[in-house]
Each structure stands twice: as C-alpha cells, then as structure tokens.
Amino acid sequence: MIIGVDEVGRGCLAGPVVAGAVVLKRAIPGLKDSKKLTRAQREAFDITIRRRALAVGLGWVAPEELDAVGLTEAVRRAMQRAVAEVMAQGIEYDEIIIDGNYNFLKEITGIPPVRCVIKADDTVPTVSAASIVAKVARDNYMRSIAKEYPGYGFEAHVGYATLAHRLALETLGTCALHRQSFAPVRAILSV
C-alpha cells in the first residue's frame, strides 16, 4: 500500500496551504492531476475517492502560520499533518510517495520509505487522489469564507494571483487571508 501526498495553494496570495494524503486499495479510473480536471470533475472524484479510499488525511497551514515559518516549512507542516491523519487511522502501508522532487517528510522517524516523484500527481493514482481531495477542500473553504471578505473575489479565484485578485488588492488592500510575507502582497502594503 502507498500513501500518496500532494499539496495545493503554494502559489496563492491568500488562504491556507493544504496537503492531502490518501491510501487507495485500488486505482480509480480517470484520476489525474487536479489542475487538469474541471471543478465538476474534481468534485465528483472527491466523492468517489472518499468513498473508496482506505484512508484520507488533510493538513492545513493558515496564512498567519505560513507568514511566521515561511512557505517551505508551511508545506512540510501541511504534509506532516495530512500523513499523521492517515497514520492515526491505523492503515498498513509500505511507502509514501510525494509529488515533486523534495522530501518534506525526511525529518520524521518511524515511517516507511518516502519517494519523491516529479509529476506523481498525474501518474501515481494515490497522489492524484491526494491532489484532488486537497484542492476540493481548499477551494470549498475559500468559496465559503469569501462571504466574510466581500469584494476580493475569493469565490472565483480562490486566492490565486489572478488579475481580478491583484486589482482587488490594489483597491481594497489586504485582509486576514492574505499572506503578508508574499512579495505582491507586501508591495500593496508598502504603498
């Protein structure tokens, strides 16, 4: 068994970084990188993954924690939290596969081997599943919290650095969801 791990929201200007960790008994046909799926496809897969997976874990790092520790440490913490949720479910597994080329779990002792695979979110079904559940969870959070921060358009761009988001930042300034340590956000703050 494999725990697949991936994160979403790394390049956003606002909102949390979220990592998913998934253990599948069998591959689910059609899984691929969450960025290559439509919203409707991701949401349908999310339901299927949660129904069929042996375990699903999510790790969250809020913007203020990210600002305090930096992006790399935030991704590490999100992945550690997601894997810890899976491990707490008592599922037996042989290996952890992380999307990318950096082992964010190398300081954790007592876990099976960790392998980093570039583009695993598109080629390893459990990592694709992790990518999808993390993306759906994060996007749904950003859409729901958008009501508390009207005018920023979080319900549409979910925190990514779109033109609409950058224009809203210039007009409204920052809010509690913005990553104060990110250069485009700092530029707005310095005006």
Image (tube, rainbow, N blue to C red):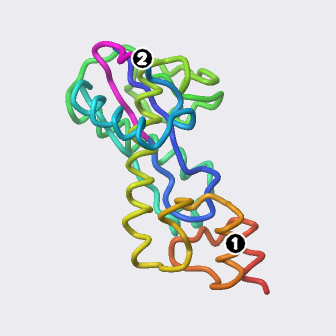
- Camera-side residue of 48 and 74: 48
Which quadrant of the figure has residue 42? Answer: top left
* Helix, strand or loop for the magenta stretch, by majority: loop
Q: Which residues are magenta?
A: 20-29
Question: For residue 28: magenta?
Answer: yes
Q: Nearer the viewer, residue 133 or 179?
A: 133
Along the line of sight, the residue nearer the viewer: 12 or 180? 12
Q: Circle 1 — which element?
A: helix
Residue at image coords 40%, 78%: 148
Residue linked to disc 1: 185
Compared with 188, 34 (above or below) is above
Quadrant of residue 111 in the image?
Answer: top left
Judged from the image, the secondary structure of the residue bearing numbered disc 2 is strand
**Residue at point 46%, 41% (across, down):** 79
Please tell me the numbered disc located at residue 95: 2
Are circles 2 and 1 on residues that touch, CB within 8 Å?
no
Above or below, 173 against 70 in this view is below
Q: Where in the figure is residue 126, as x and y percent of width and height?
A: 41, 22
Tell me residue 29's x, y (percent).
39, 16
Rendered location of residue 185, percent (x, y)? 70, 72
Residue 191 placed where, x, y %? Answer: 79, 86
